[in-house]
Image (cartoon, rainbow, N blue to C red):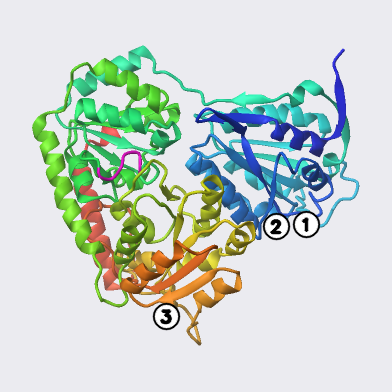
Amino acid sequence: MTNTIRLTMAQALTRFLSRQMTEMDGQRLPLFGGVWAIFGHGNVAGLGEALYQVRDDLPTFRAHNEQAMAHAAIAYAKAHFRQRMMAATTSIGPGATNMVTAAALAHVNRLPVLLLPGDVFASRIPDPVLQQVEDFGDGTVSANDCFRPVSRYFDRITRPEQIMPALGRAMQVLTDPAECGPVTLALCQDVQAQAYDYPESFFEERLWTPRRQRPDQIELAAAAEALKNAEKPLIIAGGGVLYSQASDQLAEFVQATGIPVCETQGGKSSLPDDHPLNMAAIGVTGTSAANRLAEEADVILAVGTRLQDFTTGSWALFRNPERRFIGLNVQPFDAGKHRALPLVADAREGLAELRAALGAYRAPADWGDLAMTAKAIWSAQAAKVTASTNIAPPSDAQVIGAVQRVMGSGATVLHAAGGLPGEMHKLWQAGAPGTYHAEYGYSCMGYEIAGGLGVKLAKPDDEVVVMVGDGSYLMLNSEIATSVMLGLKLIVVLLDNRGFGCINRLQIATGGANFNNLLRDAKHQTLPEIDFAAHAASLGAISQKVTSVAELETALAAAGNNDRTTVIVIETDPLVSTEAGGAWWDVAVPEVSERPQVREARKAYEDEVQARREGRDLERNE
């Protein structure tokens, strides 16, 4: 006879989550680091009471914004290389839909997060309840259906026993390297409170370890043969290298073969920046060294990357007509992109077996010499743009240089959308794996401070530096207060260029007028004078506005000794970005316009598109 225990559905859910375990560095740890919760009528009675009962085993954290708390949960998982994760719960209605943006972010970046929005009554007797979305033609629809396209797995729990198969499937998705992404379990609020006799075996402790798929031997042989014939091979290291914790295997592969490496935003810090064969950033936001090699490469080993357009220069970067791609990836969808030779495998296992299959192969010495020469040229260019000057306002690059000099590569630095990702990708000198944390898959403004909070939860002993522009800060800054409340110290460097400087530069580059991006160019009667330092102080942070790079360095040094979150504000030039490095990016310019600047930009765009097409093999890449 099966032993059972009578619990509400919500109690069964929380007890189950508290019994899931992982292992890191030989230590057995809870898989779920906790649950972020903002309670409302759709989850406070059922899930709220259940979370209270397990608060010692599964901590609950209160946030100030639903999107932000989900960002924090996602950043926590990324900082743990997907080996630990968090959940987030909201009420129905706006609380739930506030998390949809975060779900899309996790979906794009292949990061695990368990989303538990409250839902309408399964019984439908009280309909329509407060905040309920009513579809005139479909009685099964709720606001939570918005999560379907941005969830790897979605389920709506309408009976208490359904939570068992739903959680089983959820755990498979959350812990599977290939399927990994957000899971949404919409919890009908009446069902949360309903009881069921659950088998005690459902709550047995379970250890989840990463699946490490080894490569198919036929695919491995084909990949090895392609590389053995390469005269100008190149490796692109993506986020999958970090998630697989394959940095050591990558370093050994490079040491054995002499093949240069470049890194995507997600893969940056796969190798330390000072590795002689690390060309650093590739693509639109890439270094001159990485992009020069990419243009000439004949075999490109893409490891753990989905080959986004910023990485490939809209597929115009790789100009060698004989080029071939090898896609080493756990996800077949990514491994075979753009007619690559697929090598479906875990990055760590795949690199180790590919190295063995290559035998004594080494890249030609002149290719390695070219790489190191190109890197030396880039290093000089980067040092020049990041050097301290008395120019006011400074460029983003000069601010980055100041942070690098004071904090060093040992700090974990985090950034997201806007102009900073382009400059950080090129210029930041990353150290240990995971010390560079970028959200540039979904390029989500507002991720920065909330993401920093999640990273600090994951790495409480590290100094976490959040780089954020004024536009992102104004969108989502509430978790400064949460960081103070939880005693999770962040150092926030706020670059104030008075608007959306990155998009303003793109607007000008495509022939547009200065319009609606910088505050001065937006419709206004009075230009706002925002005192960001005073605002941050009102949220409980230590704050300061500085007027020069020298003052910034002094403030950063002092911030290291502060006992709580510190926000340092500096005004920057919205029109300046690093000219060296980078690659073309396909941004369509209007065919028809009354403005001559747009017509000129369109002509230049058409010429560029034609030139790119003539210089590449369309059949292979499109």
The residue identified by callout 2 is: 94
> Helix, strand or loop at disc 3?
helix
Q: Are marks 2 and 3 in contact (CB under 8 Å)?
A: no
Q: Is residue 64 above or below residue 539?
A: above
Q: Position of residue 130 (x, y in %)?
A: 82, 57
The residue identified by callout 3 is: 520
On residue 104, which mark appears?
none
On residue 131, which mark appears?
1
Q: Position of residue 542 (x, y in %)?
A: 53, 70
Residue occupying the far front of the picture: 561
The residue drawn where x is 82% and y is 46% is 49
- Label 3: how many residues lie within 10 Å, few (<14), some (14-19) or many (20+)? some
Q: Position of residue 316 (x, y in %)?
A: 25, 44
Q: Is residue 115 magenta?
A: no
Q: Amino acid at mark 3?
A: Arg
Q: Tell me the distance, in whole angstroms, between the alpha carbons under discs 3 and 1.
A: 38 Å
Q: Amino acid at mark 2?
A: Pro
Q: Are marks 2 and 1 in contact (CB under 8 Å)?
A: yes
N-terminal-most mark, 2 or 3: 2
> Helix, strand or loop at disc 2?
helix
